[in-house]
Image (cartoon, rainbow, N blue to C red):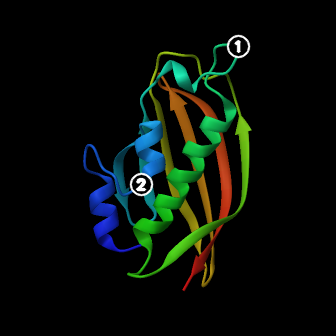
Amino acid sequence: MPQSYLDAVRRPGQTVNRLFAFLGIVVDAVEPDRAVLRLPFRPELTQGAGMVAGGVLATLLDEAMAHAVLGGNRPGQRTTTVDLSVSYLRAAKPGGDLVCEARVVKRGGRVLFVEAAASSDGREVARATASFLLLA
């Protein structure tokens, strides 16, 4: 991803990442091998029992890890998720913003190993690990 994408995705009202615009994800930080994303709470993110849906958490974790990878990539390098494992630690209750911090654990030649944690109201609600493939 070019640096221009990383600059643009941080701006309020950004349109370069339509998924972020749709969900309302805010980029709090992207730096080499680390990213912090925030998802302000909206009732539309909850499932039938009233808790934030697990798929929403998985998406936030995956995107935070992908942006940690992008933050450390060379110009022109793109990435894709190879695998993703999510552990849900407690229910993400409605009302609080979700904050997710991700970091690259190991950057190999083609494969990167990344981990992330999501929290709400200062309590960790989910953790994830993933592998990402660097594309030419």
Crowdedness near tag 1: few (<14), some (14–19) or many (≥20) residues, C-alpha within 10 Å:
few
What x and y, as percent, mark residue 78?
51, 75
Q: Name the residue under label 1.
A: 49
**Label 1 secondary element:** loop
**2 and 1 marks in contact (CB < 8 Å):** no
Pick whichever of labels 2 and 1 is earlier in the sequence.
Answer: 2
Q: Residue at x 44, y 50 (%)?
A: 18
Crowdedness near tag 2: few (<14), some (14–19) or many (≥20) residues, C-alpha within 10 Å:
some
What x and y, as percent, mark residue 4?
28, 69
Q: Residue at x 56, y 71 (%)?
A: 79
Going by the numbered disc 1, the residue's amino acid type is Ala
| The C terminus - image quarter | bottom right
| The N terminus - image quarter | bottom left
**Gap between marks 2 and 1 measured at Cα:** 29 Å
User: In the figure, 72 relative to 41: above or below?
Assistant: below
12 vs 86, left or right, is left
What x and y, as percent, mark residue 58?
64, 42
Q: Residue at x 42, y 82 (%)?
A: 76
Tell me the number on the disc at residue 17: 2
**Label 2 secondary element:** loop
Tell me the number on the disc at residue 57: none
Going by the numbered disc 2, the residue's amino acid type is Asn
The residue mark sitting in front, 2 or 1, is 2
